[in-house]
Amino acid sequence: MAQLTDDCFAFGGPLLTIEDAARLMAERIAPVAGAEMVPLYLADGRVLAADLSAGLPLPPFANSAVDRYAVRHSDLAATGQTRLPVLGRVAAGAAASPVPVAGGAVRVFTGAPMPPGTDTVFMQEDVAADGAAVVLPGGLRPGANMRLAGEDIAVGARALAAGTRLGPQELAMAAALGKSQLSVRRKLKVGVFSTGDELTEAGHPLPEAGIHDSNRIMLLSLVRRAGAEAIDLGILRDRRGELALRLRHAAGQCDLVLTSGGVSTGEEDHIKPAVESIGSLVFWRIAIKPGRPLALGVIDGKAFVGLPGNPVAVFVTFAFVVRPLLARLSGALWHEPRRMLVRAGFSYRKKKGRREYVRVTLAALADGQFEAHKHPRDGAGVLSSLTETDGLIELADDMTELCAGAPVTFIGYRDLT
Ligand code: AMP
Ligand code: MG
């Protein structure tokens, strides 16, 4: 397992932008080592460990893209129709006809190998049968309706890059190239704790002043969707000694330990002293709302991230800090979540010097554009503001005012989970 040095998150500045945070993580955190071969049917969601290059061309042989008549283009009249005798028949999966086709047409089916000498295919609906011959219209270009060997992927070409997260499309590519197994990165193990004396497990009655723990199940789901193995480590009470003991034990089993809550600097916020007693901790006051503060640390060479307690802040900081960190640790190529411009359906004021994310629903306008509507309740603890919206509007650090009607950047939850 990769060991992180104690000061790998160290950062001297007062308030860190998201970009600085991403850059520091990219510079200072190495992917965890280790790859394994897995059968294709178990490779979904895994990270490809090495480039996959093609051992055969795709398609492997020249074949017809449609049903009907393969011909040699040079047999066609320069203008107008051509009448050619039908000299044979080749179905998909059948060996190409050895019949010489000069001066004739061969009946072919989609996927059938092109008969030797032919280079063009006429579609059924374009031709007229005439006894044992066909009448072909003029004007078809040479090479029409056929696929050349290797036109998709040439032999030796890189079909998939190392670091690719494998999904349905990539698995199809691997199978087409004949791979029954792939070398993938070891799956990250991410341990998830909640912290707080007020927390009760769902399914248990709430004591006075208690709330159900909702962050942990959210984080476990986010971690799993990010392609890592999520390990449920339960609820930690607000007691420093117990916290330190269990965090250290978790660091022994996991590549990354995540907590939520307890990272402020109040009397009941014990994450900071607990982590400092067993490892090193850097407070990253990230310039992000909802979000900061956020704690990053190293415990016995393993990464630690202490997220805030409020559920919306957990969601947002996971999206913009933990997801890139997970990609980095897992050796996956990082793709920024897709940002699209929509029209602001509301006005908004914000403080300069921090990035702000506003929960919005999108409404389609008559002109095809989308308009973003802010959820009426924007507290960092308001869960309905996450379940009743489509995504986040991203407001730049230096911005102070958003006017209704202005273009704004939207990121959908589907690109963050
Ligand atoms: P803290 O940072 O620990 O002071 O928590 C900030 C707010 O988030 C408080 O209202 C907590 O009750 C709430 N909170 C902390 N952890 C959780 C959790 N796991 N599930 C739901 N709410 C939480
Ligand atoms: Mg707390």
Image (cartoon, helix red, strand yellow):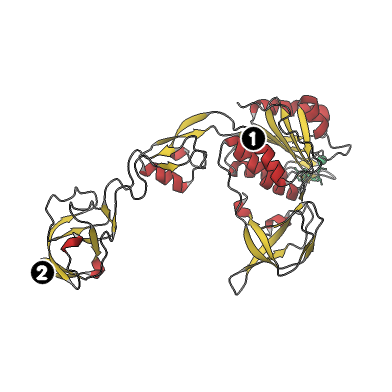
Q: Is residue 203 visible?
A: no
The foreground one among 399 and 295 is: 399
As displayed, is residue 251 above or below residue 195? Answer: above
Numbered disc 1: secondary structure: strand
Crowding at label 2, few (<14), some or many (≥20) Cα neighbours within 10 Å?
A: few
Q: Nearer the viewer, residue 318 or 385?
A: 318
Q: In this view, does 264 lie to the left or right of 317?
A: right
Q: Position of residue 383 (x, y in %)?
A: 73, 53
Classify residue 88 by image quadrant.
bottom left
Relative depth, front residue between 359 and 369: 369
x then y, percent, for residue 68? 22, 62
The answer to whether the residue labelled 2 contacts the one labelled 1, judged by CB atoms less than 8 Å apart, is no
Query: Secondary structure beneath disc 2?
Result: loop
Residue 339 screen position, x and y as percent: 62, 56
Residue 210 occupies which quadrant of the picture?
top right
- Discs 2/1, front: 2
Question: Residue visible at 45% across and 45% down?
Answer: 170
Q: In the drawing, does residue 289 fall left or right of residue 173?
A: right
Q: Residue at x 67, y 42 (%)?
A: 22
Number of residues whose C-alpha sits closer than 10 Å to that of mark 1, classed few (under 14), some (14–19) or many (20 or more): many
Q: Split into 4 quadrants, where in the image is the N terminus?
A: top right
Q: How far apart are marks 2 and 1 (CA)?
A: 71 Å
Residue drawn at (62%, 27%) of the image:
2
Q: What residue is disc 2 on? A: 131
Residue that badge 1 annotates: 190
